Amino acid sequence: MNIAIDRREFLKAGAAVGGGLALEFSIAGAALAQAQGATAPEVTHWILIYPDDRVVIRIARSEMGQGSLTGLAQLVAEELDCDWANVSTEFVSPNEHIKRKRIWGSMSTGGSAGVRTSQEYLRKSGASARTMLVSAAATQWEVPSAECSASAGVITHGPSGRKVTYGKVAAAANKLETPKDVPLRDPKDWKIAGKSMKRLEMPDKVAGKPIYGVDVQLPNMLHASIVQSPVFLGKVKGVDSKAADKMRGVKGIVKGDGGVAVVADNCWRSNQAAKALKIDWDEGSNGAVSSDTITALFKEGLDAKDLPTARKTGDVPAALATAAKVVEAEYASPYLSHATMEPMTSTAWFKQDGTLDVWTSTQNGEASIAAAAEAAGLPLEQVEVHKAMLGGGFGRRGAPQDYVKQSVAIAKQFPGRPVKLIWSREEDMQHGFYRPASRARMKAGLDAQGNMVAMHTVIACPSILALLRPEGIDKGIDSTAVRTFNDSPYTTPNQLVEYAMRNPHVPVGFWRAPGLQNSFYRESFIDEVAHAAGKDPLEFRLAMLKPGDKNRLVLEAAARVAGWGSPLPAGVYRGLAQSDGFGSYTAMVAEVSVNEGRINVHRVVFAIDSGYVVNPDACRAQAEGNVIFCLGQFYEGHTLKDGRIQESNFHDFRIPHIQEMPRVETVLVPTGGFWGGHGEPGALNVVPAVCNAVFAATGKRIRSLPLKDNDVRNA
Amino acid sequence: MIKLNVNGRAQNVDVEPEMPLLWVLRDELKLAGTKYGCGIAQCGACTVHVDGQAVRSCVTPVGSLAGKKVVTIEGLGARGLTRVQQAWLEHEVPQCGYCQVGMIMAATALLEKKSKPTDADIDAAMTNLCRCGTYARVRKAIHAAAGTQVAASPEPVLLPNGQKA
Ligand code: FES
Ligand code: FES
């Protein structure tokens, strides 16, 4: 789905008009710090401290609702030991980042990795800054640093009782060397980190401030709508824009390789004109692809010989041959849209001085600047990306950056004028980088005592990495396709995992907790095997987890809080599942009733060990969000016909409503010594825990989603 | 020219009468608080008040609004945050926040009609979609704004062995 808009084939464009520089759009945080005038010295590259003691903490990652903007600031503020009430944030400028040789590290925001992969250098920056401020004060007072201490933004000289605030010595501290190897606080002593601080961007969000990518307002701005080939990878053969050309406000039509854009003076007008285009598509052979052909491709994959092996321990064929009982099942999942509430959007402005500015909702500022520079044919240094708040990400706005490239290609035809591209919901839903559809066949062998002695798994699944990060493929294995099986903590002595990479033309991408369908498969199947062995699903799992395994700890925690085994109201049944991923260990118990084929989820208990917890309330919000996001999988699911996605909007791709939200109880079990994520781990167990409860309630096993393909009425 | 009353101000806009109010607000009047999510009255991101009723502005032709009063989020909180917005802050409702303006507008209209809505009232009125999954907190914040007693929602349990909340 590479929509490189061919700029030479540009048909018609409005006159280029130079724009002023007034900015009507507020990039949260950044705008605030700059608007207040006075410059602030940097005390380390992460921290700015104003003479009036305001502290601005720079954030390299993105904020898409997961709360890490606040969490990251808490970690810095903790070690800096400033007054939290004085803290605000600004996003790192990707252009500055390039010019300063990537001094702020990764800007990627995905894999639940924001906190866990940057906590160490962020905490060190805070600690270094505190040391520098103290030594600046000590120098001023002509006393040894060791006689001074800092707390809540105030430095005190012990013997004399003299005090000075950070703001007064920040300029002097700025001149000092950044110390190396500063000691970090024991999390037990945290005062700012580890607490449920209110999220810093909330006031803007509640007031409806224009902080998102779609909200950009620039002088003389134009609006663009795009129509992409309904069959992925299709090409534009010809465009009849006679009707569109005549429509009010239309400024130009930009024809690309795989899509056509209309530029107008208002988003509705560009969208109406886009609908009026008559485009002749070259669909290629992909026009024949359907859900059925994809299923057939996956089934062929499951039967294929000599597949790449993702895990091999013991001798699975021999163990299965001698097993007292063999259980076998096949599971399947559909393609899924991210369906972020804010559609894909990007605004690009080629300035008269030869530079390019881009405003976008991105999960990776560096990926956006690279995509924009490439599409513009400009060196990175001449491009700036202004990071907006994201109206949801869930993985869609990270690696692909397709919409950024498009907006740059379109704006290039209107030099001097900013052009804002907003995808219609229909484009958004039909041109995603979908959670891969997949199919898995599992076979387990039990010995005479009902112990699982062998497990064989074959997975047919498109490869996300093949499309978005090919260098990540290792000996034919895409780790996102085989996870949960290749790294299963169960001690089953004989395990074999094989992977059939089957890549239909449908683009796939990182969708909240990439690979989570494998938790559905494994944890549902383990439930099947436990029942075949005549054992309690909790006991069965615990028997396969080593003592001290953190998976075991969270499983026990979830079971304890949920009251596993205790009586329930009539008609309510429990199911459980456990999985680890994204650095954390998780387990879930769901309480469910089934009436006339309708599944009601009453209560979900979710236990997670992420090592440390930076903001408990934000972690709880992620747990709640993950639960309802994943309950959507019971009815969401894309179908393909004639090479294209059939569903186009929320009427036929239904996402959960408020009445489906169960009570979610979050059990935080931070055992320390490692750092795990929160944005995705909560997604892993939702489907299997509920499906296992449905089995307990009805005796019916759900082996594929969405639910409409299953009958779960009580037998 | 179409005459409009938005947030108490008379406005003249030179647009087609069939243009949905949403795009007049966002692109003509530069009131970007109201959001586009679906364009087909499914998601509620574009909810505004027309004569006090919650209305989906993506399917409301601007030509149908003569003599009516439109209120958007920018007008709602013009004199500081409303009690609904305050409840939203208090309960940290938003995640990405994109749907929340629509949620706040819908909740405000609901509370105008029913000062103490039940859970069933909330289910019926709050048909707005939130992909981030903030529904539990939306419900809690509405009850809080209404001043109704609600069962405390589950606090995170911290098991021994880790730091305290
Ligand atoms: S944008 Fe109006 S209801 Fe979705
Ligand atoms: S808070 Fe993100 S869509 Fe509702």
Image (tube, coloured by chain):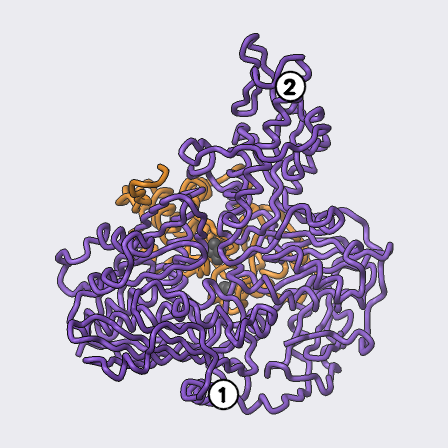
Chain colours: A purple, B orange
Vertical comparison of A289 with A547: above or below: below
Q: Quadrant of the N terminus of chain A?
A: bottom right
On the question of residue A503 being in view, the answer is yes
Q: In this view of the protein, which residue sits in the foreground, A142 or A402? A: A142
Q: Is residue A429 visible?
A: no
- Residue bearing mark 2: A137
Vertical side of A642 occupied by A421: above or below: above
- Residue at the spot x=51%, y=69% of the render? B40
Establish if A506 lies above or below A83: below
Disc 2 or 1, which lies upstream in sequence? 2
Quarter of the image where one finds residue A438? bottom left
Position above or below: A218 against A702: above
The foreground one among A259 and A589 is A589
Determine which residue is flagged by label 1. Answer: A290
- Find residue B157 and report its horizontal and vertical position in percent: 30, 44
Identity of the amino acid at label 1? Answer: Ser
The chain containing the residue under callout 2 comes to A
Residue at position x 70%, y 54% from top? A385
Of circles 2 and 1, the one toward us is 2
Whole-Å distance between the Cαs marked 2 and 1? 70 Å
Q: Position of residue A66 (x, y in %)?
A: 49, 51
Residue type at the position of mark 2:
Ala
Image quarter of the C terminus of chain A? bottom left
* Horizontal side, residue B26 vs residue A81: left or right: right
User: Is label 2 in a helix, a strand or a loop?
Assistant: helix
> Label 1 marks which chain's residue?
A
